Amino acid sequence: MSLGSARHRKHWGWGYADEQPSAPDLSAAAGFLSGHLGFGSAEPTAPAPLPGLPAPRLRAPESVAGWCSVDPAVRARHAYGSSYRDVVRGFRGEFPCPPDVVARPGDERELEATLEWALGAGATVIAYGGGTSVAGGVEPGGAGDVVTIDTTRLDRVLEVDTESLAARIQAGASGPGLESQLGEYGLTLRHFPQSFQFQTLGGAIATRASGHFATGPTHIDEFVESVRALTPAGWWESRRLPSSGAGPSPDRLLLGSEGTLGIISEAWVRVLRRPVHRASAVVLFASFAAGAAAARALVQAGLRPANLRLLDPEEARLTLAGDGSAALLLVGFEGAGTDMGRVVESLLAAALACCRDCGGTAAAGAGGSPAASPGGTARADRDPSSAAEVWRDAFFRAPYVRDVLVAIGVLSETFESAITWNRFDSFVESVLGATRAAVLEVCGAGHVTCRVTHVYADGAAPYFTVLAPAARGGELEQWEAIKAAASEAVLAGGGTITHHHAVGRDHRPWYDRQRPDPFALALAAAKSAVDPGWQLNPGVLLADAVAGGPDGRRRGHP
């Protein structure tokens, strides 16, 4: 069996090899972006071709070889995730530590056989979904012999409970794939992260991912009814229930486990009827703080917009959603019933009244329409020139734009946190200040902007973007210095080191300081119980395992 498909992901960066911009289009994009940002080259550099890789140190036995590959292109595509650091290394053609073998089991029997072989061979095992990690969550590093288990052949909606509005879905189902299958029932998972094109359900669960909806169900945690995962100690499956108070929840421990406690094979998740109505508007505020106050007032008044995104003036300008003179608050409501049109319009009217009370001014064009399809595709029933739609389309195209930025020598990084309202303004100010100072020191110039991606009654998730001129050959050192300064400011301000980008290896030094020490000990003990050899994705969440013990097995330390 071939591990290829009709379409191949390129060996670096985002997307399929057959959908990359042509040379003229790339040059045009480079010219526009460098002029828009004020730095970067108008002439993009070409990425390095796929180099020769280190020879694989493992060979799959005949019992599992049918779904395993040592093809260099396949190994390279599974060497990294999708962070700026990953894209730069792939762009340079640097693949010093690819996985030795990539396995793509097609069912649980093949998954069991693969894991049994890999563990017996003493290999590190990395679970891999869509490869969309932006926190160093899937790269082998220097982990010795490595088997990466790609779950994307486990891609089916297995069962739909229309009475309970839930579905049993395999872990490798992609965002578009599962939405297409659920659409046959008029249902949706309603989980649309920026990585929607390639994200998998198992990856979302393993990283506690969030969709772009700002309130209501948006964290994958809120969708999960039960999870089934394979561990070295056997199968781990939680009972499917709407809720339970029976001690610590088994599925909650798998949420955010990042492949360290087992390989997720499927899950029961809550689904929704597809919305048929939407009403949205853009509200302008004199300052980011004023817009944040309006967002807080909205949710604390009991309104729960599907979309409630706040862009600071510079973020609005850079994304072409505004001219930089005002902060933009994007407000939208959705309804699933055919009679919900008036309801969503009345909710929008109430939200706009709240915004006016906070000093906001609604832009022209607010109103209702049939609900848009996911994925950011323009439709005839939408005004593509509106600020909300410009931003929405830019949101889903951002991973492609980042590849162009790397090609023209622009450092592009994002990081996010969450903080309570009583500390929000000072937190944003301090993190922006520290990050801007680091960008100026390291790069000499650049933009650091902020938006709010998720809003709660007690706080919000500020999301920061860094764009700066990169020094060819020194991009990673620049990135590391800026990342460290920003992360230190986040922890010093009392925020979380990540709101929805997971921990991986990139955030682990700060996660180690954020979590309580007794919890770290408990987490290490849990890993030792289900993965006594510490072979599942070591170095993520917990420090690498170390040799020790009379039986020669490895024990980990928090």
Image (tube, rainbow, N blue to C red):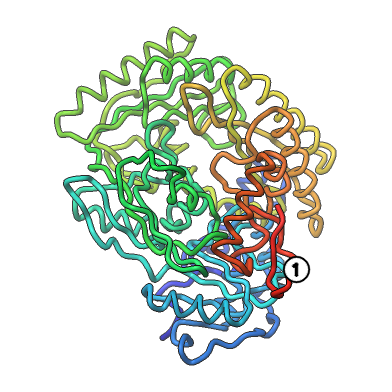
> Which residue is nearer to you in this view: 190 or 553?
553
Q: Residue at x 50, y 68 (%)?
A: 233
For the residue marked with disc 1, what is the amino acid? Gly
Residue 345 at x, y percent in the picture: 26, 22
| Quadrant of the rendered image containing residue 352 | top left
Residue 113 at x, y percent in the picture: 45, 80
**Number of callouts in the render?**
1
Q: Quadrant of the N terminus?
A: bottom left
Identify whether 362 is placed above or below 525.
Answer: above
Identify whether 181 is placed above or below 330.
Answer: below
Mark 1: give few (<14), some (14-19) or many (20+) Cα within 10 Å.
few
> Which residue is nearer to you in this view: 207 or 486?
207
> Which residue is nearer to you in this view: 265 or 280?
265
| Residue closest to the far left | 339
Identify whether 153 is placed above or below 459.
Answer: below
Q: Residue at x 54, y 77 (%)?
A: 102
Residue 86 at x, y percent in the picture: 65, 60
Left or right placement of residue 261 versus residue 465 in this view: left
| Residue closest to the far bottom | 62
Q: Is residue 44 visible?
A: no
Left or right placement of residue 34 versus residue 475 in this view: left
Residue 528 at x, y percent in the picture: 61, 61
| Residue closest to the far front | 550
Q: Is residue 370 visible?
A: yes
Q: Which residue is mark 1?
A: 548
> Which residue is nearer to you in this view: 167 or 386?
167
| Residue closest to the far top | 357
